[in-house]
Amino acid sequence: MEICAICAEHEATTRDHVPPKSIFPRPRPGNLITVPACAECNNGASDLDDLFKVYLSMQAAANSEIAARLFREKTVRTLKRNQRLLNKLQEESAQIEVTTEEGRIETRTGYLWDSVAHDAVIERTIRGLYWHHWGAPLTRDATLSVQWLQTIPDQVLEKISLFNEVALGDDQVVYKYIISTDDPRFSLWFFDFYGAHWASGYTQPTVI
Ligand SMILES: [Zn+2]
């Protein structure tokens, strides 16, 4: 039997996109990645994927024409169907002052990401991509941590040529990763979504 790439525990009965296909507007890139997944891991994911798509498209729409299309074609529809999410966005929004490129100060509406959805989607994406590139799931004696990034740290940029790089679609998602061949429980991952949102994660042996 084939084991689920995400939980490394249950039988895989379906395939799951990593990162989730919902963050790509149609026509979707031809090189999206799927991995074997159990029903539980696959079904549990779609609400979180929806949330991730909504926040990502709101953050990235100003930076990227494709992200703006994601917002217009998918996010608007999701919000029309989901009054609860729309209310949550409005409750959690705040007026923030930003300095424009011309140096003017303007007030804009800012939205706080749902960090639970964010971290869950990044974690599942890393687990799936780990399986895809390493050929086996991350073992259960390893721990995965997700981090938010404002930018990619300098120490990493110096060593980035050692990383493998993969671009999905028209650079809609670019990720870099390295998996230790000495102990594959160590791995490091950086994601660039639409040139507007960055995240990273790492795995290491679980400290008991
Ligand atoms: Zn699973």
Image: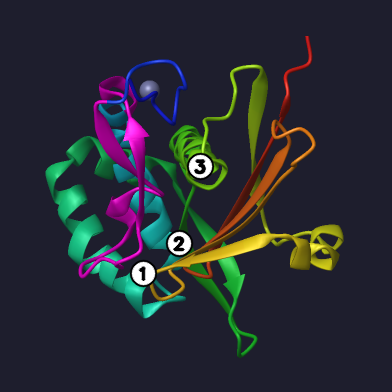
The span shown in magenta is: 13-41
| Farthest residue, direction left | 81
| Residue 26 belongs to the span the image colors magenta | yes
Between residues 72 and 99, which one lies in front from this camera angle?
72
CA neighbours of label 1 inside 10 A, class few (<14), some (14 to 19), many (20+):
many
From the viewer's perspective, tell me whether residue 106 is left or right of residue 11.
right
Q: In this view, does 123 lie above or below 74?
A: above
Q: Which residue is drawn at 53% across and 67% down?
A: 196
Q: Check disc 1 and give the amino acid type.
A: Ala
Q: Residue 45 carries which label?
A: none
Q: Check disc 3 and give the amino acid type.
A: Ile
**Residue at the spot of label 1:** 67
From the viewer's perspective, tell me whether residue 99 is left or right of residue 55.
right
Q: Which residue is drawn at 53% across and 64% down?
A: 166
Quadrant showing the C terminus: top right
- Secondary element under disc 3, as helix, strand or loop, is helix
CA neighbours of label 3 inside 10 A, class few (<14), some (14 to 19), many (20+):
many
**Residue at the spot of label 2:** 59
Q: Check disc 2 and give the amino acid type.
A: Gln
Q: Is residue 93 above or below residue 185?
A: below
Q: Could you give the CA–CA distance between mark 3 and mark 2, rounded to whole angstroms?
A: 16 Å
| Residue 36 belongs to the span the image colors magenta | yes
The answer to whether mark 3 and mark 2 are in CB contact below 8 A is: no
Quadrant showing the N terminus: top left
Q: Which residue is drawn at 50% across and 38% down?
A: 131
